[in-house]
Each structure stands twice: as C-alpha cells, then as structure tokens.
Amino acid sequence: MNGASSYPRVAVIAIIRDQEGKVCAGRRIGPLGGGQLSFPGGHLEYGEDIFACAEREALEESGLLIRGVRIVGVTNDFFVKNNKHYITIFAECKCIDPEQQPQRLEPEKCEGWSWMSWEEVESMAVDDRTSENIFLPVVNLIKSNLYKVSALG
C-alpha cells in the first residue's frame, strides 16, 4: 500500500470555545497538514474514551484544561498526498478555567494557539481560494454542515 496503513486511523479533534464563543486554533507543523489551521487533537489511543483523548491532547498541546461536552461530528478524511486515511471525531469542549489562555507546548507540532471566531474559520474553509489553509478534517466538517456555532450551548 505504498507506506499507508491497511485501515484508517482514528483522530479526535477538540473544538474548544472561550467565554466569547471563539475557538482555540493554531497552524500545524509537519507533513500532515503543515501550515494549515486546525484545533488541538491527535490519535485516539487503544481503550481510550473519546472525551479523554480530546482532554489529553488539548492539555499536551496547549495546556488548556478542558471538559468534553458532546460529539459534534465525524468526518472521513483521505490525505491523498500523504497516502493516509483518517476517521476524525470532533468533540465540543469547554475550558474548566475560563481565564486560562492556550500555550505553545509542542513547538514541533504547532506554530502557536490563538482564539478565532468560528465565522472566520468557517468562511476560510468554504472559500476554495483559502480552504487549502485549513486542515482537511475541519474543511470536511464545515462543508458537510455537521457543526454550526449556533448549535452551541
């Protein structure tokens, strides 16, 4: 299979909102989605709960202490250039401490974290001129209309 796994991997991405409804976003570093905007996340480990994965990845990558609230979408993502296939689960999450700010704890994986409006991420993902700047699973989530900011509580 030319270096690819014979089955899809499972990833979990945390959509973390602050008190103003903005989401924690950062630019990825590395061969898969390098330079693209995404949210904290990573591989689901064997036996791991989906929310536990979202909470662990957010803590490792950004230092944010979060709580998973609900699953808001699942995407089927083919990274043709990298010969990879992922099933990505998106978990809506809330910060435990609303005053806490994200930190760049894994400089080899992310350029840095900031708070962005969902509308800004959404508009970039649906515009063919800018969608290549957004990580494929996020584009797929937004283009599938699975998740809308108005659905958040």
Image (tube, rainbow, N blue to C red):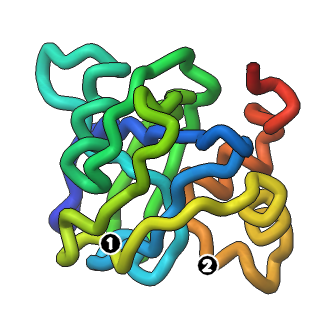
- Amino acid of disc 2: Asn
81 lies above or below 101: below
Name the quadrant containing residue 144. Answer: top right
- The answer to whether residue 77 is left or right of residue 57 is right
Q: Can residue 8 be seen in the rendering of this structure?
A: no
Task: Give me the residue at 42% from left, 27% from top.
Answer: 96
Task: Give me the residue at 21% from left, 75% from top.
Answer: 107
Q: Looking at the picture, how far across and down is residue 35, in whole percent?
A: 45, 82
Q: Looking at the picture, how far across and down is residue 76, in whole percent?
A: 53, 41
Q: Which residue is denoted by mark 1 in the rendering?
A: 110
Q: Which residue is denoted by mark 2 in the rendering?
A: 133
- Amino acid of disc 1: Cys
15 lies above or below 83: above
41 lies above or below 96: below
Task: Give me the residue at 48% from left, 54% from top.
Answer: 39
Say how many tags the image has: 2
Name the quadrant containing residue 12. Answer: top left
Q: Residues within 10 Å of mark 2 (few under 14, many from 20)?
A: some
Q: In terms of secondary structure, where does tag 2 sit?
A: helix
Q: Residues within 10 Å of mark 1 (few under 14, many from 20)?
A: many
- Which of the two residues, 25 or 147, is positioned nearer the viewer here? 25
Distance Cα–Cα, label 2 vs label 1: 14 Å
Q: Looking at the picture, how far across and down is residue 81, in whole percent?
A: 41, 76
- The answer to whether residue 147 is left or right of residue 97 is right
In the current view of this chain or complex, which residue is farthest to the left? 46
- The answer to whether residue 141 is left or right of residue 86 is right
In the rendered image, which quarter contains the C terminus?
top right
Which mark is first along the chain, 1 or 2?
A: 1
Q: In terms of secondary structure, where does tag 1 sit?
A: strand
Task: Give me the residue at 74% from left, 81% from top.
Answer: 130
